[in-house]
Image: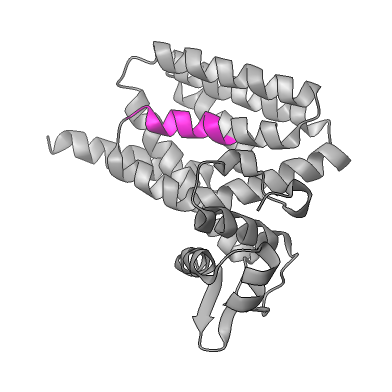
Amino acid sequence: MEKREEFLFPLKWIGNASTGVRLASELRIRIISGMIPAGTVLSENKLAQEFEVSRSPIREALKTLASENMIRLERMGAVVIGLNEQDIKELYDVRLLIETFVYERILKIDTTELVQELSKIREMMEVAIKYKDADEFSYQDVLFHETVIRSINHTYIYLIWNNAKPVMESLILLSMRMRLEEKIEDFSRILKNHDLYIEAIQKKDRDIMIQAMHQNFDDVQGTVDDLWMSQQMLTTKGEQNQ
C-alpha cells in the first residue's frame, strides 16, 4: 500500500494503523464513492493480488466493512451493499443526536480551553482552503467536531461517535473534494458556520447553536429543532431524577 496515486483515502490519516484498517478505509471510500458499485462481489484472492498483501488483512478489512453494513459476507465472497439515501440520513440523525446531547453537557462546564482549541482548528481549516487542500480541510473539519464531542468526557457517546466516524469521514472527504472542484465558494459558508459553533460554545447560547446546526445539517434533513427539543427534555428529566 505504498503507491499513493492508487488510493482514494489519504494514507496520512491512518499511517500508523494496521494493514487491515488501511484496506478497510480504502475499500469503504471506494464503495461510498460508487467506484465499487452495490452488488459487486469482492474476492479475497483478487483483493490480495490488487493490494499486494496476504489474505489475512483482507479478511480483517472485510469483517470491519461487514460490521458497518457496507458489505454482506457470503460463501461466494463479500457482496457490496453500499450506502443509500436513507442510510446517509440515518447517519446524520446519529450525528445530530450526539451533538445536541454534547452541547447540553457543555453548558455546565468551563469551555475556555475548548474554545481555544476549536479556534486553532478553525484557523487550520482556513489555511487548508488557502492552499486548496480538500483533504486537510476535511481532516480538520472532522477533528473540530470530534474535539467538541471529546470535551464532555462521556465514554459511550464517544464510542457511538467512533462507530459512525469512518463512514462520516469518507462522506465528508468526498464532499469537500467535490466542492473544491465545483463549489469552492461554499468553503466561506462552512467557515462562518464553524465560527457560530465556537460563539455558541463560548457564550453558551442555545439559539446560536441551533442556528449553527441548521446551517450545518439542513441540506441533509430538517430535523434539528425536533432533535434539540427532545434532547433538552431528556436533560431536564435527568436533572429532576438526581
Please identify the dominant SS of the magenta region. helix
Percent position of residue 182, x then y: 87, 42
Q: Is residue 95 above or below residue 78?
A: above
Q: Residue at x 33, y 29 (%)?
A: 152
Image-based side of 133 in relation to 146, left or right: right
The residue at the point 77 percent across, 42 percent down is 177
The quadrant where residue 122 appears: top right
Report which quarter residue 30 is drawn in. bottom right
109 to 96, vertically: above or below: above
* Residue at point 51%, 88% (across, down): 75
Colouring:
one colour
Q: Is residue 206 magenta?
A: no
In what quadrant of the picture does the C terminus appear? top left
Residue 25: where, in percent of width, then height? 59, 54
Image location of residue 57, percent across then percent down: 51, 63
Q: Is residue 157 visible?
A: yes
Q: Residue furthest right?
A: 182
Q: Is residue 148 found inside the magenta-colored segment of the image?
A: yes
Q: Residue at horizontal 57%, vertical 15%?
A: 120
Residue pushed farthest bottom? 76
Above or below: residue 72 compared with residue 173: below
Q: Position of residue 20 (x, y in %)?
A: 51, 58
Q: Along the horizontal axis of the image, is 230 left or right of 87?
A: left
How many numbered circles are shown? 0
- In this orientation, does residue 92 appear? no
Extent of the magenta region: 142-152
Please tell me in which quadrant of the rendered image residue 186 appears. top right
